[in-house]
Amino acid sequence: QVQLVESGGGLVQAGGSLRLSCAASGRTFSRYVMGWFRQAPGKEREFVASISWSTGRTYYADSVKGRFIISRDNAKNTVYLQMKGLKPEDTALYYCAQGIFEGKSLDPDRYDYWGQGAQVTVSS
């Protein structure tokens, strides 16, 4: 089993910044993807960004390109989501997820393990 614990959420004004962290523990795999998803009230869970742990290749949703950066710290088994230029529409519960596959997937069902979520609220 894999445990994922997010931290770093909070309330910020529009235009502000936040950094989310996701620490992974438990079973390890040689190839996997770490992703960030978000879900706003009444909406479906949507892909935000992902990073391949072995190659470092990153992917972003169009809505966050140029504003969010996903990164990893191999030694700490931690993935980060640096968010800048936050907008009220970025308000959501942000989830960290791990998928045991290589490449890119925007489908939440491809991911095997999930954190509990971190709330991000952006005021206008």
Image: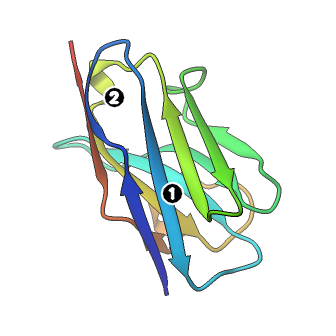
Q: Residue at x 65, y 81 (%)?
A: 28
Q: Nearer the viewer, residue 79 or 33?
A: 79
Three-letter amino acid code of the residue under disc 2:
Asp
Can residue 105 be seen at all in this image of the molecule? yes
Residue 37 in the image, given as x and y percentages of width and height: 43, 49
Q: Position of residue 35 (x, y in %)?
A: 54, 54
Could you tell me which residue is drawn at 30 percent across and 64 percent down?
A: 116
Q: Is residue 97 above or below residue 50?
A: below
At 51% from the left and 57% from the top, the residue drawn is: 107
| Dot 1 alpha-carbon crowd within 10 angstroms: few under 14, some 14 to 19, many 20 or more | few
Left or right: 28 as drawn, with respect to 67: right
Q: Is residue 46 left or right of residue 34?
A: left
Position in image of residue 54 (x %, y %): 80, 62
State which tag comes first along the sequence, 1 or 2. Answer: 2
Q: Which residue is mark 2?
A: 90
* Residue 111 visible somewhere in the drawing: no
Q: Which residue is mark 1?
A: 107
Q: Quadrant of residue 34?
A: bottom right
For mark 2, give the secondary structure: helix
